[in-house]
Amino acid sequence: MGILDYVLLGLLHPTEFRSLVQYKLFFSHQRDITATQEHPDSGWDRETMQECWGYLDKTSRSFAAVIKQVDGDLARTICLFYLVLRGLDTIEDDMTLPDEQKQPLMRSFHKYLSQPGWTFTGSGPNEKDRDLLVHFHVVITELDILQPERKDIIVDIAEKMARGMADFAHQAATSKDPATKYVQTIEEFDLYCHYVAGLVGEGLSRLFAASKKEAPWVADQLVLSNSMGSLLQKTNILRDLAEDVEEGRYFWPKEIWGAQGFTELAELTDPKNEERGLWALSGMTLDALRHVTDALDYLTILKNQSVFNFCAIPAVMALATLDVCFMNPNVLRRNVKIRKGQAVQLIMKSTNPRDVAYICRDYCRSIHKKCNTADPYFMKLSVMCSRIEQWTEHHYPSIITIRPATEDGRSAQARIDTDPKDARLRIFNREMQIRKRVGGSKQINGTLESEKGVEEGLPKELYLAIIGGLLLTSLLGLAVVYGVLFVVGALDK
Ligand code: MG
């Protein structure tokens, strides 16, 4: 960003400008991987690892900063995992490589990871990450130094991913029917996203568990980790439409855009087709939002703060991207990104599952607000946004506000919003009354006081009604007995 960009940001988005300054001052350099005390974990004292960190900066503009902040040697492990997959992805994306060369290269890629000195110089001249493959031997050298268990995970994921990518690349390259160059169904799209991103989620979960920073069972949460990866991947695919179409890569599934009357994906980028293009974009947004609640579930099971940040930051960025792209015709013609000030605000706010859920909920509200009733996905999008809203309210009721701990020793406190009109307050107080009767309840900040009279009055009324009913029944009984005796004349004798 130039000085003019900063001035414009300060004028147009002052809160984001403030966040950017705060981020530069306090957040961006939390961990210095080059510091001497970090060398055993970061490997900065080795030239090969220094090169690897350098390639991470070059190839990953958004992930490099968050990877470096992960605790201990897990950051180095994730850096190598990222570079391995980036190398594989560079081969997959390279449209200058013929299928007969790409197929064996991808299917043997995992074996090269254990072949010292292996490099690849055949990438197209315009491949932005070709330099990484030209010097790939540094990654292989560093993989060899890694704990065997961690290297095995990386090799295993690379093998599975390469196999899936190769299958899709082969289908696209060899199909005689031009229509089959596209991913056809949403199911097929799910499978592709599983290969290229869901497996990253699986690999990371296994690495988190292997490093002992997360529980061993985190490695087994395959559905949740797959959703986390798919959410990020589908968001990127949605955002990169114009760029991918220009390069001849087609990831949007035909089931979604074909339903809007298109026969070729490139037709979406034609300004004449803008409205139908936006409906297709809605379909893609809906499909990406499908993974949000699983991703939020995944975040709730993490306990290490740096691991949490590493997973949560890309997730909220994805939601922000989905929001900025939704109903935005520019997506059909160029790459749309969130502002840098917005990105640092999200980085600073994404520190716990509750705040992350609220951020996601707010983006869903924004998407819902922009929904057009003429949109064929209007109802489904409304239901999907409500599902995310419901997840958030269920796990983190907005009635409870959290006052964070302070540096002078005051611990964090939960507080209930005491608006007596709020129906949730009545439900909460009733629940607290029941717990109080069975013992062991905790009163939260006097909120029981506000509704005490109302809540305690109910049982008394019930008792009075029962007693009144019994008295009335007894009186009626006596009257009936008296009446019978009077009729038969027994009272006269
Ligand atoms: Mg790719």
Image: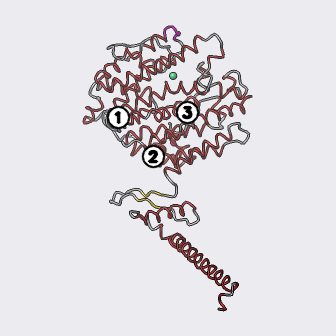
What numbered label is drawn on residue 126? none
Q: CA distance from mark 3 to mark 1?
A: 27 Å
Q: Is residue 433 above or below residue 252?
A: below
Q: Nearer the viewer, residue 479 or 69?
A: 479
Q: Quadrant of residue 64?
A: top left
Q: Residue furthest bottom?
A: 492
Q: Amino acid at mark 3?
A: Thr
x and y, in percent, of residue 126 in the image: 51, 17
Instruction: Give the foreground label among 3 and 1.
Output: 1
Q: Amino acid at mark 1?
A: Ala
x and y, in percent, of residue 222 in the image: 45, 32
Question: Magenta residues, as a range?
Answer: 97-101
Q: Are the two marked residues, 2 and 1, in contact with CB atoms closer than 8 angstroms?
A: no
Residue at 32% x, 34% y: name it: 211
Q: Amino acid at mark 2?
A: Pro
Q: Is residue 175 above or below residue 468?
A: above
Q: CA distance from mark 2 to mark 1?
A: 19 Å
Report the residue marked by disc 2: 353
Instruction: Give the foreground label among 2 and 1.
Output: 1
Which structural element holds mark 2?
helix
Instruction: Give the foreground label among 2 and 3.
Output: 2
Report the residue marked by disc 3: 235
